[in-house]
């Protein structure tokens, strides 16, 4: 896969605050890149710099090997943006909004008509074409927001937290739509602080915090980077502190806690469940249910930064 | 395409329709009802009891007395184009100024005209309890007489062969300022209350387009709105988008003002004169000023779009208020006590410009006022464009 976007040593300061700190990344053609980080981590600032909406202090941004700038109109014509906020005109109808924003890219009226209809079909807003945005539900507005960003069939699409405040049904529709766009050949940069979404969608993930790149790789690669590989939960009664200590001392066990009902053990790679159950059986504890959970991206983030990813 | 959509967007903007179109028309209707009665209604009134004291005699004082005698004669008034079927004034003999002043205090007469023939001036004295009609009649008679006399005098010197025609025209035009009018002092000129309220409303309607300027910069500026961000990342040049958004709103704003002028003239019978070219220039510059001021408000004040709209609207309200939209005497009072306000207040400048355009024989004052507004417009536009160019978000 060829490199489509290359960000090198990007620095963006807001007076004393360093919003993006020597950040570098690449985006490959046809992939979905997840940009993951808590609120205020520098995701949107990075995106705004890439889009030439913001000037930056240092570094370079290349798209298709050309330097991105406010006047790089040829590059801009290949880009589509779906901002976090629903960015449409309240006075125009669904159709008119899509046509207006598509018209900023496509001058030919007939071609635009076809593209607008395709976008409406894509986000399934056919029944709402003549509606004004204020009459649409939150989920439908989000779909309109997406349609306005993709109607001109861009090759590179930036999705900036497109599912904020959306019901689960609409969220699934949006995520399915993004998958479909990738299948159609678009390269997608998806920013979110919802790790499940990024985990579900992204081929590759970049974790960003305080404007710095924390980790980069596929979901599996990221999870393999951390020590913790499993969270084991066992429902059991009356485990003594002495036996808990025995469990803690087993190989690959980082921590074990017991609240009187549930034993929670953080473990690394290995045959951990078997070893723990063996200890409990030897002591005659009766166990009800045993769970083994794989680490999440939040665990990855926690291990790299010492804090939770999700702050809401 | 963009122009059409911005046009459509503005037409569906309830704020624009209300403040720039509906509100001024509603206000005109209120003024019409207040000053003219609910139906076609001329204000009917009793002849105003008046005395004339001639302090020094000349052709000026003699002609003034003749005019007053005509106004006191019901038949003459009926046969004129004044639109009344009774006398405008009732002349009461007063042997001296002191006697006439006593009569005013005793409410035997309402108005005393002190005519100084040598200096060609008329001083008007009214009692404390003089009502609006009395004031209107008194001032109207004097101001019109003074103006017409000057024209006659000028004609006698410059075109003595046409003096008869001029006199005929003027004798018909003296009663034009029917009894609905009064005058206020300004920078040496005078203004008709009824017309002033309407003209002020037209200016107010134009100035409310300041919000159109704000919305224009919000529509294109990436750091001000998310829709602006969307337009900024597109390959369409920002200057082109700006021009489309601005021109669409400007076209509508001018259209609305022309409609208001038409409505004012046709439905409320307020004269707009026949200087079509100058009226067009007035409307174009007035709206351009409002929108360029709006651009500055959009770019330089803080807060969201509504908050900036509110600030701009408050500014316009103050400007229009000071120009006499609510209290017609205010510009006159300001002229006496704080004349700088009248000189810098855009609404006052525009009101006087239009008043002069409609009522004055020469247009010097009109053009001077328009030049002042044009200079301000140019400054606002330059500053706005510089700010837009220097903005960190996608430059023009």
Image (cartoon, coloured by chain):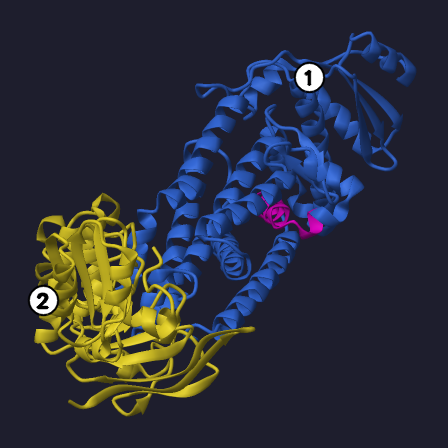
Q: Residue at x 40, y 46 (%)?
A: B256
Chain A painted colour:
yellow
For the N terminus of chain B, the quadrant is bottom left
Q: Is residue A146 left or right of residue B283?
A: left
For mark 2, name the chain: A
Mark 2, Cα crowd under 10 Å, few <14 / some 14-19 / many 20+, is few
* Stretch of the chain drawn in magenta: B342-360
For the C terminus of chain B, the quadrant is bottom left
Q: Name the foreground residue: A277 vs B266.
A: A277
Magenta includes B343?
A: yes
x, y (%) of residue B212?
A: 43, 53
Mark 1, Cα crowd under 10 Å, few <14 / some 14-19 / many 20+, is few
Q: Is residue B86 left or right of residue B153?
A: left
Q: Name the foreground residue: A154 vs B3.
A: A154
As displayed, is residue B162 above or below residue A271?
A: above
For mark 1, name the chain: B
x, y (%) of residue A115?
A: 12, 68
Q: Residue at x 44, y 32 (%)?
A: B26
**Could you say whether the residue bearing mark 2 is in a helix, strand or loop?**
helix
**Could you say whether the residue bearing mark 1 is in a helix, strand or loop?**
loop
Q: Name the foreground residue: B366 vs B92.
A: B366
As displayed, is residue B293 above or below residue B274?
A: below
Residue at numbered disc 2: A114
Residue at numbered disc 1: B131
Magenta includes B100?
A: no
x, y (%) of residue A144?
A: 20, 57
Q: Residue at x 85, y 14 (%)?
A: B100
Q: Which mark is residue B184?
A: none
Chain rendered blue:
B
Residue A95 appears anywhere in the view: no
Residue B267 appears anywhere in the view: yes
Distance from label 2 to label 1 (Cα)? 71 Å
């Amino acid at each position: 896969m060829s490199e489509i976007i290359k960000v090198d040593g990007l620095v963006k300061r807001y007076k004393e605050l360093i919003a993006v700190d020597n950040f570098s990344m690449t985006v490959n053609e046809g992939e979905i890149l997840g940009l993951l980080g808590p609120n205020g981590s520098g995701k949107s600032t990075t995106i705004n710099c890439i889009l030439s909406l913001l000037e930056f202090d240092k570094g370079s941004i290349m798209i298709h090997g050309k330097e991105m700038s406010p006047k790089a109109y040829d590059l801009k014509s290949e880009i589509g943006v779906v901002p976090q906020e629903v960015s449409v005109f309240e006075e125009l109808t669904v159709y008119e909004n899509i046509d207006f924003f598509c018209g900023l890219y496509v001058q030919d009226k007939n071609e635009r008509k076809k593209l607008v209809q395709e976008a409406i079909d894509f986000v399934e807003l056919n029944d709402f074409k003549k509606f004004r945005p204020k009459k649409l539900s939150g989920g439908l507005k989000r779909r309109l927001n997406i349609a306005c960003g993709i109607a001109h069939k861009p090759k590179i699409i930036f999705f900036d937290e497109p599912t904020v405040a959306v019901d689960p049904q609409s969220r699934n529709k949006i995520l399915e739509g993004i998958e479909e766009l990738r299948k159609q050949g678009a390269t997608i940069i998806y920013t979110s602080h919802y790790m499940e979404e990024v985990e579900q969608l992204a081929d590759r993930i970049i974790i960003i915090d305080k404007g710095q790149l924390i980790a980069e790789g596929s979901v599996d690669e990221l999870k393999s980077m951390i020590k913790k590989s499993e969270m084991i939960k066992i429902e059991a009664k009356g485990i003594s502190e002495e036996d808990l200590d025995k469990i803690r001392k087993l190989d690959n066990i980082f921590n074990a806690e017991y609240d009187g009902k549930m034993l929670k053990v953080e473990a690394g790679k290995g045959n951990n469940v078997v070893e723990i159950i063996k200890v409990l059986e030897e002591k005659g504890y009766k166990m009800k249910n045993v769970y083994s959970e794989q680490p999440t991206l939040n665990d990855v983030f926690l291990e790299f930064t010492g804090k939770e990813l999700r702050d809401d | 395409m963009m122009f059409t959509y911005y046009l459509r967007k503005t037409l569906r903007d309830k704020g624009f329709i209300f403040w720039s179109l509906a509100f001024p028309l509603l206000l005109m209707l209120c003024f019409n009802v207040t000053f003219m009665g609910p139906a076609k209604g001329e204000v009917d009134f009793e002849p105003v009891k008046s005395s004339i004291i001639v302090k020094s005699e000349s052709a000026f004082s003699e002609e003034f007395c003749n005019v007053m005698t005509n106004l006191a004669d019901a038949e003459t008034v009926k046969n004129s184009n004044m639109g009344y079927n009774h006398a405008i004034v009732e002349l009461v003999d007063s042997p001296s100024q002191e006697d006439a002043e006593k009569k005013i205090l005793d409410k035997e007469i309402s108005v005393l005209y002190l005519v100084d023939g040598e200096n060609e001036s008329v001083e008007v004295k009214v009692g404390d309890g003089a009502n609006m009609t009395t004031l209107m009649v008194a001032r109207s008679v004097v101001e019109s007489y003074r103006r017409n006399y000057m024209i006659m005098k000028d004609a006698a010197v410059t075109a003595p062969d046409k003096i008869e025609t001029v006199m005929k025209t003027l004798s018909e035009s003296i009663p034009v300022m029917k009894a609905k009018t009064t005058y206020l002092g300004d920078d040496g000129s005078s203004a008709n209350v009824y017309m002033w309220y309407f003209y002020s409303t037209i200016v107010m309607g134009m100035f409310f387009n300041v919000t159109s300027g704000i919305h224009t910069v919000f529509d294109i500026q990436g750091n001000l709105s998310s829709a602006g961000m969307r337009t900024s990342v597109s390959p369409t040049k920002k200057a082109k988008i700006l021009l489309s958004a601005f021109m669409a709103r400007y076209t509508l704003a001018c259209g609305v003002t022309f409609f208001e002028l038409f409505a004012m003239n046709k439905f409320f019978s307020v004269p707009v004169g026949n200087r079509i070219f100058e009226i067009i220039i007035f409307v174009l510059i007035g709206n351009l000023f409002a929108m360029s001021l709006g651009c500055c408000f959009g770019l330089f004040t803080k807060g969201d779009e509504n908050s900036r709209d509110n600030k701009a609207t408050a500014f316009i309200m103050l400007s229009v208020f000071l120009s006499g939209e609510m209290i017609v005497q205010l510009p006159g009072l300001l002229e006496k006590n704080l004349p700088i306000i009248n000189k810098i207040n855009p609404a006052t400048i525009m009101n006087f410009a239009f008043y002069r355009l409609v009522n004055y024989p020469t247009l010097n004052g009109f053009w001077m006022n328009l030049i002042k507004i044009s200079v301000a417009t140019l400054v606002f536009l330059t500053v706005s464009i510089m700010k837009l160019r220097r903005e960190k978000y996608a430059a023009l």
